[in-house]
C-alpha cells in the first residue's frame, strides 16, 4: 500500500477531496492510504494557536515549529518514517519526473502545508527532506499544492488506474504533449472528428497521434520540443510530413 499523510489546517476539506473519484476507489481497495491531519490538534495551548509573530519584525505570522513537529511525530510514530515534503514557493518546481521518482523511491510521503508567511525554519531543518513548488507563483496556503502532488503521485501507483497506458500516453510522460482527443458525436457545431480516427486502421491512428503530439509540443512548448529525440526513421518521416503540411500555410 502506498501511503500519503498531509499536515494541514484544513483537514476536512483536504480529506474530502482526496477521498473522491479514482483516489477514493483506490483507498477502498487498500491500494492507497491518504490521510489529512489537523495541525491544531497538536498544539499545547488552549487556544489551539499554531502561529506567532516573526522574529526580526515584519507583517504577518509564522507557523510555529512545535505544533508542526508534534503532528509530524504522531504520523511517524503511528505509520513509520516517511519522506517529508514541504510545499513551498521556494522549492524546486514539481514535474512528472518528480512524480515518478516519488512513486518509485518511497512508499510513504508526508506533505506539509504552510500558511501565513511560512513555517519556522527550524522545523524544516529538522524534519523536511525536500521542498517542492508547483510553479512560480504564491498561494494562500499549501493545501492545493499538496493535493496536486498527492494526486500526481498516487495515480501512478500500480492498480490506481486500470492500465499503465492510462498515464503513459498522456502529456509529459515521454517529453511530449498529448495529442487531441475526440468523442461522439462525429460532428459538433460543424466540426468533424478527423477521418483517420474513424478509419479503424490502428497503425494510421498511432501515426496520426504521434504526429499531433510532436506538432502540439513544437507549437506550445518549444522548450520541451528542443529536448526531444526525434532521430528515428519513423519520427523523421513524420517530421517531413509535418513540414510539408505546414509550408503551404505560411
Image (cartoon, rainbow, N blue to C red):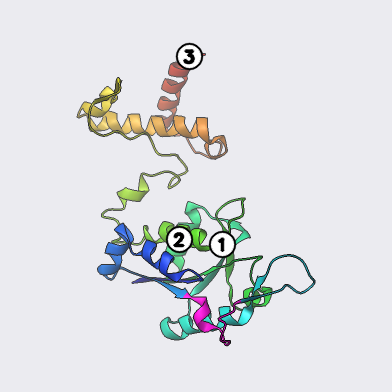
The front one of 56 and 21 is 56
| Distance from Cα at disc 2 to Cα at disc 3 | 43 Å
Answer with left or right where residue 194 lies relative to residue 128: left
Q: Quadrant of residue 127?
A: bottom right
| Between marks 1 and 2 in the image, the one whose residue lies nearer the viewer | 1
Q: CA distance from mark 1 to mark 2?
A: 11 Å
In this rendering, the answer to whether 84 lies above or below 146 is below
- The residue labelled by disc 1 is 141
Q: Is residue 206 positioned above or below 118 on the image?
A: above
Tell me if residue 161 is in the magenta stretch.
no
Q: Which residue is mark 3?
A: 249
Q: Nearer the viewer's eye, disc 3 or disc 1?
A: 1
Pick whichever, 143 or 74, lies toward us: 143
The residue beneath circle 2 is: 147
At a point 48% along the width and 80% down the height, the residue shown is 81
Answer left or right for 185 relative to 178: left
Amino acid at each position: 500500500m502506498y501511503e500519503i499523510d498531509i499536515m494541514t489546517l484544513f483537514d476536512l476539506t483536504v480529506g474530502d477531496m482526496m477521498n473522491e473519484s479514482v483516489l477514493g476507489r483506490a483507498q477502498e481497495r487498500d491500494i492507497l492510504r491518504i490521510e489529512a491531519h489537523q495541525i491544531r490538534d497538536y498544539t499545547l495551548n488552549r487556544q489551539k494557536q499554531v502561529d506567532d509573530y516573526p522574529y526580526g519584525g515584519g507583517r504577518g505570522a509564522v507557523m510555529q515549529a512545535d505544533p508542526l513537529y508534534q503532528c509530524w511525530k504522531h504520523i511517524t510514530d503511528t505509520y513509520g518514517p516517511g519522506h517529508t515534503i514541504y510545499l513551498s514557493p521556494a522549492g524546486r518546481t514539481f514535474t512528472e519526473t518528480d512524480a515518478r521518482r516519488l512513486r518509485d523511491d518511497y512508499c510513504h510521503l508526508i506533505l506539509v502545508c504552510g500558511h501565513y508567511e511560512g513555517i519556522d525554519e527550524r522545523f524544516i531543518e529538522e524534519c523536511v527532506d525536500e521542498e517542492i513548488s508547483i510553479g512560480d507563483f504564491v498561494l494562500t496556503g499549501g493545501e492545493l499544492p499538496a493535493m496536486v502532488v498527492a494526486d500526481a503521485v498516487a495515480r501512478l501507483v500500480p492498480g490506481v488506474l486500470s492500465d499503465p497506458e492510462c498515464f503513459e500516453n498522456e502529456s509529459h510522460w515521454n517529453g511530449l504533449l498529448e495529442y487531441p482527443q475526440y468523442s461522439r458525436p462525429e460532428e459538433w457545431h460543424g466540426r468533424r472528428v478527423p477521418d483517420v480516427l474513424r478509419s479503424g486502421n490502428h497503425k494510421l491512428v498511432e501515426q496520426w497521434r504521434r504526429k499531433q503530439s510532436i506538432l502540439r509540443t513544437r507549437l506550445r512548448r518549444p522548450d520541451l520540443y528542443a529536448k526531444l529525440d526525434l532521430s528515428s526513421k519513423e519520427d523523421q518521416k513524420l517530421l517531413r510530413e509535418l513540414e510539408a503540411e505546414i509550408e503551404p500555410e505560411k
